[in-house]
Image (cartoon, grey):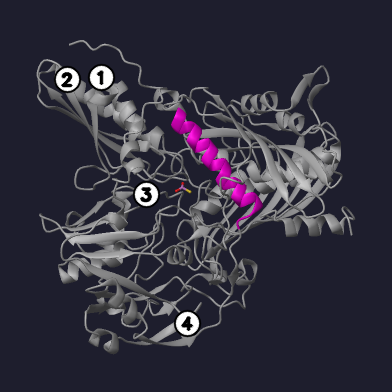
Amino acid sequence: MSFEHTRVISESVKRIDARGKVTGETRYPGDIDIEGQLWMRIKFSERAHARVRDIDASAAEALPGVIRVFTSRDVPVNEYGLVIKDQPVLCGPGGDKAATDVVRCYMDMVATVVAETDDVARRALDMIDVQYEDLPAVFDAEEAMANSAPQLHPDCLGNLVARYRIRKGDMRAGWAAADVVVEGEYETTWQEHAYLQPEAGLAYIDEEDRVAVLVAGQWTHEDQEQIYHALNLPPEQVRVIYPAIGGAFGGREDMSVQIILALAAWKLRRPVKIQWSREESILYHHKRHPIKVRAKWGAASDGMLTAVESEVIGDAGAYNYTSNKVLGNAQLTVTGPYVIPNIHVDTYAVYTNNIPSGAFRGFGAPQALFAAEGQMNRLAAALNMDPLAIRLKNSIREGSIGSVDTPFPAGVTMPQVFEACGRESWWEQAASGWRLRAPAQPADPSKRRGRGIAGGFKNVGFSFGFPEHCWAGIELRGKADIDEVILYHAGADVGQGAHTALSQMAADAVGIPFDTVEIVASDTASSGSSGSASASRLTFMSGKAIQGAAEIALRKWKDEERPARGEFMYRPPPTTPFDPQTGRAQPNFAYGYVAQAVEVEVDIETGQVQLLDVVCANDVGKVINPQQLQGQIEGAIVQAQGYALMEYVVSDEGMIRNPFLSTYLIPTSLDVPPRIKSVILEYPDPIGPWGLRGMAEMPFLPLAPAIAAAIFNATGVWIDSQPFTGQKVVATLRRQGIGFI
Ligand code: MOS
């Protein structure tokens, strides 16, 4: 048996889903119809916090064409949640679980209507009469921590869904050693995922009498688990399939339509479909966490950090979703990619009656790094040091001990990434050290240009002791030669091109040409659990699983088994949670590193900030598909540009007032910077397959603080809350006496 070696790793092979998506043949959940299907609409809460006294659906059920109205009494086990099952599937009286009769935010569901047509289902919603008894509500995380605040969940004093701390070194000695101390307060707000395909799905009874749910998500097996738990069914009675997925970014980690569709199809034994509008999508799925950070950093006159004290408060909204994990990651990144001898951090995730906050590309790190890198830039200014030079002095490197008092996993390349970013942008390495070249200023005196830099790191894989795993199956078909390779994998291609990259890795692992591989993906009926398309983990984890499965299959092939089938469950080195007292932990097994330099132009008359140039240095370990990698970098930067400069959720006592893409503004092709330079570094991760590291979230992380630094460089003014809208920037400039009156 011999194969001609075809290069398939580090090649921009054509995406396997390209043709279908370009021609429109690809079917997303909303495009799929089944003969005889019914339509579902959801009655959402009309209160931010209230007890549901009674639901009268008799008028709605009497409407011709209405098949059934489902309420809390119909849900066998009325609870769900990705990490903590703290949310009722349907809120109302008579549920089997405690406190299911309370709505805690406007995105709670009270009832679902199933009807012959979508129009009838929609009309029936207004005929459902819900009696509420209002409860006191709280919309601010710090207010929610007070003893007098309304308590949202039983047994959750102070509404604290998570609380962490770091106590490292000797703070008194740290402050004594500091020649300069800078203090800052940083605030970040919600961000909407704005994926292309709003929530949609279809549930039906399949040929093996399973309830099958066709939906867009990030982890088929986790969706399956939450569905069978709520329906009180054995796992094998529930099947989850992802057809094409129109983007996710963390926004599909939690449930939307999965459980209610499955419940209706299971009870009615008929196919049931739902399709949300853009307005419903924005109103009823979670957002990125608003996080407030109070930070005090000290450094010696040579720039070496001596002490960091931070308080981190995250608004979890009404339910946990992934808040306890997101705030854990915020705590881990709020000290930045630096070695700091003395650290004191307190971190809180707090329930409020706002929309739940949850996973969104970066998972707490963008907010925390906004504060950390803001502090670093302030320190550089206070010490009159170059912002790159001070970073390199303090940067974590191979063997460094982290804030959690354990060494970073081997393969730390933060200094190399910072240096590459400086070199490829506007820094010169003179005898005296790194020096930033100032930009040429425009002739127009109302325009000021500035440059800034920031960096960051993020975990690859689930953190803090979660039992990480990833499954793959490989089947080799043929007689003398391998003619066909089938890769079975549950991983979600959310639009990032994962299935193409997985197929490339399978081809290389087996040693056959790329187009010999066929992937059977994202169906719980044909795959083991691969974990989610999240935490920048999928390529890394799947690569290891695919290598393991290929090795087994090739061994069986040699032993003349036809077809030869290998299955493998990869388990990375274990991680540990924060020690409750000291924060000591081994939180992760791998990291990715990133740094960005930006140039902006600030209009001091209007406050408008133009992003002119971005240089993004990424250590990805090994490129699998260069073009897709480029797409991830550019996409993350544009998404982060929206976060930094324009995106703003208007929330009025828990009610989102701008649930449209005409009022919630995201960058368009006219906004993207004229140039994004991607600097790809390939320092292998010692345990990564082919040496690769995860990279999908990393280019999001440092953009907002890099832009804030560039605004300071241009104007001498710090902006400490995002988004840096014209209105906010101009007001800040005026307060400091800058600009025209
Ligand atoms: Mo992501 S924010 O790890 O889905």
Mark 3 close to ligand 1, CB under 8 Å: yes
Q: CA distance from mark 4 to mark 2?
A: 63 Å
Which is nearer the N-term, disc 3 or disc 2?
3
In this view, the mark in front (4 or 2): 2
Q: Are the two marked residues, 2 and 1, in contact with CB atoms closer than 8 angstroms?
A: yes
Q: Is residue 452 magenta?
A: no
Residue under label 3, please give it: 218
- Residue 255 occupies quadrant: bottom left
Q: Amino acid at mark 1?
A: Ile
Question: Is residue 126 or residue 141 the one in the foreground?
Answer: 126
Horizontal arrangement in the rendering, residue 466 relative to residue 350 (left or right): left
Q: Main secondary structure of the magenta part?
A: helix
Residue under label 1, please give it: 512
Residue under label 4, please give it: 50
In this view, the mark in front (1 or 4): 1
Which is nearer the N-term, disc 2 or disc 1?
2
Q: Which residues are magenta?
A: 627-647
Q: Which SS class for mark 3?
A: loop
Q: CA distance from mark 4 to mark 3?
A: 32 Å
Q: Amino acid at mark 3?
A: Gln
Q: Quadrant of the N terminus?
A: top left
Q: Which SS class for mark 1?
A: loop
Tell me the residue at 29%/55% (across/down): 31
Q: Is residue 630 magenta?
A: yes
Q: Which SS class for mark 2?
A: strand
Q: Position of residue 600 (x, y in %)?
A: 73, 41
Q: Position of residue 659 (x, y in %)?
A: 51, 66
Q: Are the two marked residues, 3 and 2, in contact with CB atoms closer than 8 angstroms?
A: no
Q: Position of residue 374 (x, y in %)?
A: 72, 45
Which is nearer the N-term, disc 3 or disc 1?
3
Q: CA distance from mark 1 to mark 4?
A: 61 Å
Checking the image for residue 26, the label placed there is none
